[in-house]
Amino acid sequence: MMVAMTASRREETGEEISPTVRSEAAFRAAREVMPGGVSSPVRAFGAVGGIPRFIAKGAGAILTDLDGNSYTDYVGSWGPLILGHADERVVAAINKAAAKGCSFGAPTEAEVRLAELVIARVPGIEMVRFVNSGTEAAMSAVRLARGFTGRDAIVKFEGCYHGHVDPLLVKAGSGLLTFGTPSSPGVPGTATADTLVVPYNNLSAAKELFAEHGKRIAAVLVEPIAGNMGCVPPAEGFLAGLRSLCDQHGSLLVFDEVMTGFRVAAGGAQQLYGVQPDLTCLGKVLGGGLPMAAYGGRREIMEQVSPLGPVYQAGTLSGNPLATAAGIATLEALAEPDVYETLETRSARLAEGLSQAARSAGVPVYQTRVGSMLCVFFAEGPVTDYASAVRSDTKAYARFFHAMLEHGIYLAPSQYECMFVSLAHTDDLIESTIQAADEAFDEVARG
Ligand SMILES: *Cc1c(COP(=O)(O)O)cnc(C)c1O
């Protein structure tokens, strides 16, 4: 697609222009005024090299950059856009809400409606508090778990990302993994002193930890499907095992479903795997592309949140009317028949096509997928945790990434992120993506 558009513009203008000339200029200006030229690190293309495409607009599954190049988008704003870009229903809901005022700092009926939709779908949620980002949701869930249990220690897993919350910014995957930093300067040792880290999918390590520290552990925080070191599904029995460990030791089980919530099933990973957490973090899909997240769980625990209880948490823009409207429109659209079946069928076809393309080219990859989140690891063996994820050949991924971009396919500019399929990815787009991958893997194989 991109190649065709560039060629036609060359014919029109008769001059040789780089297909990224406007993005390059914008990136130069951006770097003068924003660290790395971006508002969030991985966007800067540091892990793959080259010029980040500055986006002019999105429609359905298609992104268009400043230079007029179009791409089939598998980033989907890093997860929220399960309906695709500028979905008519979501845009209409936002416009309607905006016309009535952007923020009140007072309760609205729409928040109640969204809360009811969330509670009806997510098995572990009886009450919910809206916040503005996944980071805030995880931060607040940790505070609540500590407040409720009167304990300080929290358990997290290597390679799981819960936003840039100080106590959780230890071996945290995503951007940190992309840039090879185990943790961040500026996080004092005191902030992470009560954070205990265990390898993902390693139940026996978690058991050993509980045997020693069980009485101190307020909560186990886990991505029920790890999505920030690429897509790493939970091993059989892993989540259920964590559930019983928490029950035995009076600790809370917190599922960070910021990525998986409303993505892998209507009720998220907890519904898919039949394991109910005490608290759940939501975000991404919940806001339909606007800043919106939430934490919720058992009534008894949520009743500890201010003003009902003593655990303080607040937000000027929390429950923002525009974000709430986008969230309601998104969840309502996801209630239509066969939505998750459609995502499953298309995502399965994509995963199978990508694997086949890699095999034909003789490029060793390990393909993972749960519903519409998937990852192609440039690795030989199975990827089950952080240690096996970091064995990936990130240079090969970078070559694949650029080859796909040349063919008009926009993937995450890092090996350690998921691909997301949306309802706007038609069967035709999936097939053209597989065709592009056929050529891209050949190019990777040629070196
Ligand atoms: C994206 C993500 C977060 C952070 O959400 P932000 O809105 O970026 O702060 C937290 N947890 C998980 C599992 C995520 O995927």
Image: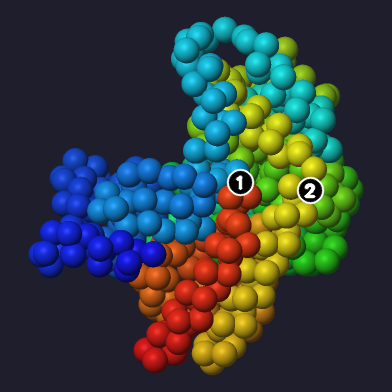
Does 69 sit left or right of 74 as displayed?
left
**In the figure, is residue 345 to the left or right of 386?**
right
- Image position of 247 with respect to 393: above or below: above
Q: Quadrant of the C terminus?
A: bottom left
The residue sitting at 80% across, 43% down in the picture is 337
Do tag 1 and tag 2 residues touch (Cβ < 8 Å)?
no
Examine the rendering and report whether any part of residue 48 can be seen: no
Vertical side of 438 occupied by 116: above or below: above
The amino acid marked with disc number 2 is Asp
Q: State whether residue 95 is above or below residue 233.
A: above
Going by the picture, which residue comes out furthest to the left? 15
Disc 2 residue crowd, few under 14, some 14–19, many 20+, Cα 10 Å: few
- Residue holding disc 2: 338
Q: Is residue 309 above or below residue 374?
A: above
* Residue drawn 70% across the image and 55% down it: 343
Q: Amino acid at mark 1?
A: Ile
Look at the numbered disc 2 and give the secondary structure of its residue: loop
- Going 15% across and 63% down the picture, which residue do you hit? 17
> At which x and y percent is residue 83?
60, 43
Q: CA distance from mark 1 to mark 2?
A: 14 Å
Q: Tag on residue 82?
A: 1
Q: Quadrant of residue 175?
A: bottom left
Foreground residue among 114 and 310: 114
| Residue mark closest to the camera, 1 vs 2 | 2
**Quadrant showing the N terminus:** bottom left
Q: Is residue 375 left or right of residue 280?
A: left
